[in-house]
Image (cartoon, rainbow, N blue to C red):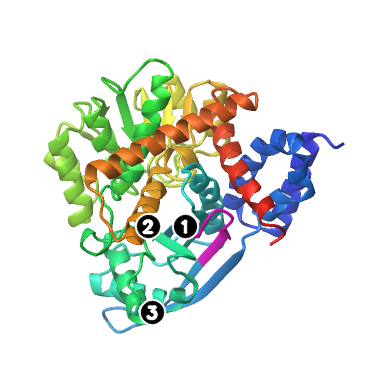
Amino acid sequence: MASAESLYKAFMEHVIAKNPAEKEFHQAVGEVAESLMPVMERHPEFRQAKILERIVEPERIIMFRVPWANDRGEVQVNRGMRVEFNSAIGPYKGGLRFHPSVNLGIIKFLGFEQIFKNALTTLPMGGGKGGSDFNPKGKSDAEVMRFCQSFMSELFRHIGQNCDVPAGDIGVGGREIGFLFGQYKKLTRQFEGVLTGKGLNWGGSLIRPEATGYGAVYFAEEMLKTKGETFKGKRAVISGSGNVAQYAAEKVIQLGGKVLTFSDSSGFIVDEDGVNTEKLAFVMNLKNVKRGRIREYTEKYPKAKYHEADANASGNPLWSVKCDVALPSATQNEINVEDANNLVKNGCYCVSEGANMPSTPEAVNVFLESKILYGPGKAANAGGVATSGLEMSQNSLRLSWPREEVDQRLHNIMINIHENCRKTAEEYGTPGNYVNGANIAGFLKVANAMLDQGLV
């Protein structure tokens, strides 16, 4: 029988040859496949049924043009896409990302990660992802509405509450979900739970905006508990200043921690006095209402320091700020090997990922070799999609649960995800390795469902 190493190498060569120039997808598949080699050795039935080869191939990819007119009446053309990756345990579920960087490789990486993330929540949701290279930044509400309506005019054919349920992601917040839902309803004449992240007045769930940030902190809290510690007095660095970063900060403050940083594409701020509730409210208004830049924080609070981003720098100095806990909440591959070494060198011993795959493979290796507490995104940031699943349940029941109930359910889900990852890592001989625990636990649920359902 071939060794695990040769099996992994042959498998990855096959994936890269079939999916050229999709480096983020290769990275996501490689990280999962490496964790799964002991599982493939222990379960010959998975190898015989080619589960791994089937799970990396999306069930369906939809790509389409999105024509729209700007406020000057000029025709614009973007590309839209939806990758329906795996429906073994439920309807496809995953966000839509509107950002100039969006391409098929990025959407496939996100959709692939979503399969295992959704499985870890224990809710019946498959994996999918979508988006467009449209940039909502700097666009008027009317321009965003026209784009969303054009985008949904094609996407509506492929989604539905029991088929595929998109949500928001980078560039897609409450405004965009509203425009998308309105067009879906107009085209289908159905008022159904087809999108999550909806407004509270028309089918949304309490705690949904907070869920990803809260969940990443709840996961970090569980990891800290394994060392007999809490968030009280901990110094936390957070990247990003959007939805995830804002609510991660809110929960850290509630648990007695000290938030030191926020960032955006222009640079980052460091507030050694700590971001309190009043300062956080300023950030939320700045980003959510005024759509301003994070440097404006230092105009309001001059004791804080602003550091402009340097595109030519080898690392991000935000990750050199002395801290106990890091919550990367911006975008993929924002922590490289230099950043990871700086975090560990400066005393960070707990990393919980609020963004999807924010650490490069080399950075992950630094965390694992240093034996710090490291929660990978597919486990640590699963709170967002978990609460999307709770929104789907409420829509199906025609009910709206109170805030405390949704938050308690979210908290319990994150506790269960942590415990499942911890136990699975131990069972497969790598105690404390949440990467292996998350990958294996998520995979086993999906793989067994695929076996049960036959060759489809």
Work out which quarter of the rendered image holds the C terminus and state it.
Answer: bottom right
Determine the residue located farthest toward the right in the rendered image. Answer: 1
Work out which quarter of the rendered image holds the N terminus and state it.
Answer: top right
Q: Give SS at disc 2.
A: helix
Q: Which residue is mark 2?
A: 392
Q: Nearer the viewer, residue 410 or 350?
A: 410
The amino acid type of the residue labelled 2 equals Met
Q: Nearer the viewer, residue 80 or 261?
A: 80
Q: Which numbered tag is attached to residue 188?
A: 3
Magenta span? 82-91
Q: Which numbered tag is attached to residue 445?
A: none
C-alpha distance separating marks 1 and 3:
20 Å
C-alpha distance separating marks 2 and 3:
18 Å
Q: Give SS at disc 1.
A: strand
Residue at screen point 45% across, 73% down: 155
Which of the marked residues, 1 or 3, is nearer the chain's N terminus?
1
The amino acid type of the residue labelled 3 equals Thr
The amino acid type of the residue labelled 1 equals Lys
C-alpha distance separating marks 1 and 2:
10 Å
Disc 2 and disc 3 in contact, CB within 8 angstroms: no
Q: Is residue 4 above or below residue 169?
A: above
What x and y, as percent, mark residue 316? Answer: 41, 37
Q: Nearer the viewer, residue 264 or 425?
A: 425
Q: Give SS at disc 3.
A: helix
Q: In this view of the protein, can residue 320 be seen by the observer?
A: no
